[in-house]
Amino acid sequence: MIGKFSRKIAHSYVAFAAAVAVICLSFGVVLVQRENAAYIRGQHAAASSEIRRTANALREKLFGMGLVAERLATFASSPKGLSQADIEKIANRLVRHHSDVISVAIAPDLVVTQVSPQKGNQRVIGTKYWQIPGQFVGIARAYREQAPVFVGPIDLVQGGRGYILRYPVFLPGRYSDAGKFWGVVSIVLSENGLISAADSSDGQSPRIALRETRPDGVARQNLYGDPAIFDSDPVTETLSVVGGKWQIAAIPAGGWATYSPKSPLIAGTVVLVTILLVSAILIIRHYAVRSHETFNVLSHAIESLEEGFLLFDRENRLLMANKRVAEYYRIAPDKLKPGLPYDEIVRHAIRRQPDEVIEGTATVATERDQAIQVEEAEAADGVQQLVDGRWLKTSNAKTPEGYTVGIRFDISAQKSAQLAAEAATRQQSEFLSTVSHELRTPLTAIAGRAAFLAKAHLLPASKQLIAAIGQDEPDMAELQRLAQAHIDGISGQGQKIINASELLLSLVNDLLDWAKAEGSELKMTPEIVSATDIATNIVDEMKIQAQAKGLSLICMCAPARVMADPSRLRQVIYNLVGNAIKFTPKGTITVTVRNKGTRVIIGVEDTGVGIAPENIEMIFERFKQVDGSDTRSFGGFGLGLTIARRIVELHGGRLTVTSKPGEGSRFEFDLPKASAATAQFSAQAAAKASKDAQNAAALAEQKSDEITLVRAGS
């Protein structure tokens, strides 16, 4: 019965293998045919796309050049004429849009009198076109046809080769006819600027050719590329530009193909796949009869588990494991095979790179160290942390036969949530500790000084004044002295309360600004302001504070205007200068303002204690200082730089720091220059106004509909 079943299975597999071979080969033939057709269509499509791209680019470029030439011709032939500044303004606008334009020249009576840009084109001034036959031909044609003419590539007066758009200028005649010939406007284009090649990483861009044709279709002149392309059955397109007709042609880089270069590969792949499939089917037929259904069912059940499953023999050697185990422990499937010791799996999970390298030799853990690590990995709570940071819950159990069954659960999400909760708790504790510590100092000063004022009669100056008043014949001069001393004492206590109150208010304001920044509620009202004036005023205001510490505070500020919120900009500079004074025991603090392209760079440099490289990023974290102990030398929440960086980022800038311990630090941030930011700001304002208008119209329409419904209901 078993033999009959095996033969039946064997015959079925042979028939199936034959059917698979026929299907695969038929599919391969169809696939090759479709690939060839698609490849040829792709060649035509690529050539057509390249022609359309080139034609559109040419239309745009030549249209712009034509407009500029026409405008220059109109101005130049007018009685007022055209100044060099006007030419440069118009030419620079054209060059900005088309960087391959070399020059724009004005030639009344065919003598070049003005050219822009002048750099690199000085040799053109004074050129008499009738003395240069190669260039006079195009001018003569433009004169005859009384229309713009595009010629090239030809040798240029300023050197090199290029294309020239000749625009003839005629003075107005009678009855709208062209009058006297005035001269010509010329726009020079670089030789490589007429057609820009399409990007192609494989070098297979279509080949392009361009020529000008006569009205009867006969070629007048070849402008670009190999003229032979027009004889190679190209894809063509005709366009009308600068008073004439141009024809663009394109063919593939290697010519038109009859079949796809992938066809042999596809055919070979299909044959190989067919052979492999047939061979695989025959091999499966050989083993299918002898397969163990029970083992297959068990394997499939284990593989379907969402948890990692391991089975070890009595000697703790691996018998089987599912794919989850390989994923958890990052073990290659070919390494996770029967016979692998249990300890080796655990070691692989905890293995790390060597901690030290001494004279080129890495330190390697001993077997005893590895054994200790294995014991630690198999912790009492059954939790392992893997080398990639993930966490596994482990569970091992013995079977009656002495085998070990292991289950592994990925609890990384739960562990991450637990660690995040613990970190949040620590952060909350640190926040409360920092706030209470910093607020306690000014509050203690206020309470102490207020207690003195509440019992002013117990002050020594008060007692002396009362005693002097109680004398039978008081000395008025002494009374005045004692009264003034009493007033000075009261004022001194009040001033100390004011100082402590200002410190307390500053701390509270820092907390409020930080809370707004954290909640994205820190609003900016940008306007055009002088960064130089703000920086200079701050230096003047804080110079006394710096001089009290024996420091030199100077300002090296170039004239610069920025688009910024003035109060927030003052806040940032105040914070940076205040920090510099606080952390500089001696030396100089320099505030700088300089222009850099479209940005303005503002910096504060000191010769203070400096910052270690490992603490550079920490100083921008909230409630962080390099010295975070309760006995630190400098107070504050550690929010100033956090708020300053956020304000700079809201302005579109970036606050950075460079420092060397013991040598000083330089804090620097950039803001948009007013000239560059005004256009962007105006565009944003216009867009917002348009959106508000649309919303208002929609709201009015909605209210109108509601009124209509109410009237209809009544």
Image: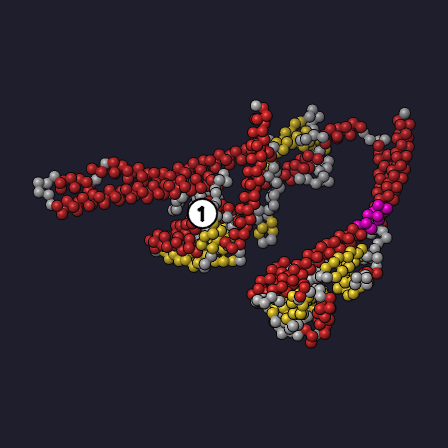
| Tag 1 secondary structure | helix
Identify which residue is drawn at 56% across, 29% down: 707
Residue 535 picture location, percent across and down: 42, 54
Q: In this view, does 552 lie to the left or right of 91?
A: left
Identify which residue is drawn at 57% across, 52% down: 358
Of residue 322 and residue 118, the one placed in the foreground of this image is 118
Identify which residue is drawn at 84% across, 45% down: 34
* Residue 416 in sight: no
Identify which residue is drawn at 75% across, 64% down: 223
Outermost left residue? 472
User: Which quarter of the figure has residue 314?
Assistant: top right
Q: In this view, does 634 lie to the left or right of 394?
A: left
Residue 421 vertical placement versus 56 (above, below): above
Residue 270 vertical placement versus 50 (above, below): above
Residue 520 picture location, percent across and down: 50, 40
Q: In this view, does 81 lie to the left or right of 318?
A: left
Residue 265 picture location, percent across and down: 83, 49
Examine the residues drawn in magenta and state their main secondary structure.
helix
Is disc 1 surrounded by few (<14), some (14 to 19) or many (20+) residues within 10 Å?
A: many
User: Which quarter of the figure has residue 179?
Assistant: bottom right
Figure quadrant of the N terminus: top right
Residue type, label 1: Arg
Q: Mark 1 points at which residue?
A: 568
34 within the magenta span: yes
Residue 290 vertical placement versus 143 (above, below): above
Residue 435 picture location, percent across and down: 41, 38
